[in-house]
Image: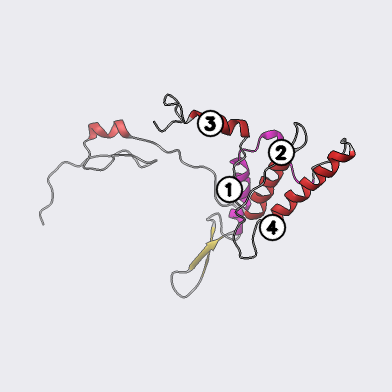
Amino acid sequence: PPRSTAPARSYPPRRGLWCGASPRVPRERRGRHAVTIPVVTDPIAKPDCPQCEGRGWLVADDGGAGTARPCPCRKELLVPRLLDSSGIPPRYKDCTLGSFKLAGYSAAPVLALQEAKERCTRYVHEFLTPEGTFRQTGLLLVGPPGSGKTHLAAAVLGALIRRYSLRGRFVDFSSLINQIQSTFDPASPESKH
């Protein structure tokens, strides 16, 4: 087949996602629709890992091209990233179920707080069902201000992330309700119109 005599076109380097960067889209239209997605600089593997040499994958010889499986160093970096993106407020980042203290309360609230702590601990331990699936129910913590609800919620989420490498999101109830309400306002950026 004859080769095209059309002049060669230069396109921007592919450092993100370009909408309309196809050669069929005229150049004057390309710039208006360009969207750049930032390059993720967080490594998925330790650069000095002796097992994978910073690749994040271990390749086992299988007589062919090899079989790849994730290197354990990936999980070491994954959990801190999941915790950072969980939305747990900085004040509660270090909360654990073990650090939940019952001192300073009278006898009646201590019993209720002890039960809440035990239920939260049981929830984490039983999150993986005997069938190998994750639990489909959640926790609802109710109580007066200062009773430890936020500490327990942050501790449960942190424990689930550390134990199962799950994604989770800490959301303050008032903020969630305000965000949901804003979706009903047509002038709001949250609204789908």
- Quick one: 97 or 58, which is closer to the camera? 97
Give the Cα separation between the discs numbered 3 and 1: 21 Å
Residue 102 x/y as whole percent: 84, 41
- Quick one: 54 or 162, which is closer to the camera? 162
Give the Cα separation between the discs numbered 3 and 2: 21 Å
Q: Nearer the viewer, mark 3 or mark 1?
A: 3
Range covered by the magenta-colored residues: 72-98
Give the Cα separation between the discs numbered 4 and 2: 21 Å
Q: Are marks 1 and 4 in contact (CB under 8 Å)?
A: no
| 71 left or right, relative to 115 | left
Residue occupied by mark 3 = 179
Can you say whether 132 is above or below 63 in the image?
Answer: above
Q: Secondary structure at mark 2?
A: loop
Residue occupied by mark 1 = 167
Chain-order first, disc 3 or disc 2: 2
Residue occupied by mark 2 = 142
Chain-order first, disc 3 or disc 1: 1
Q: Nearer the viewer, mark 1 or mark 2?
A: 2
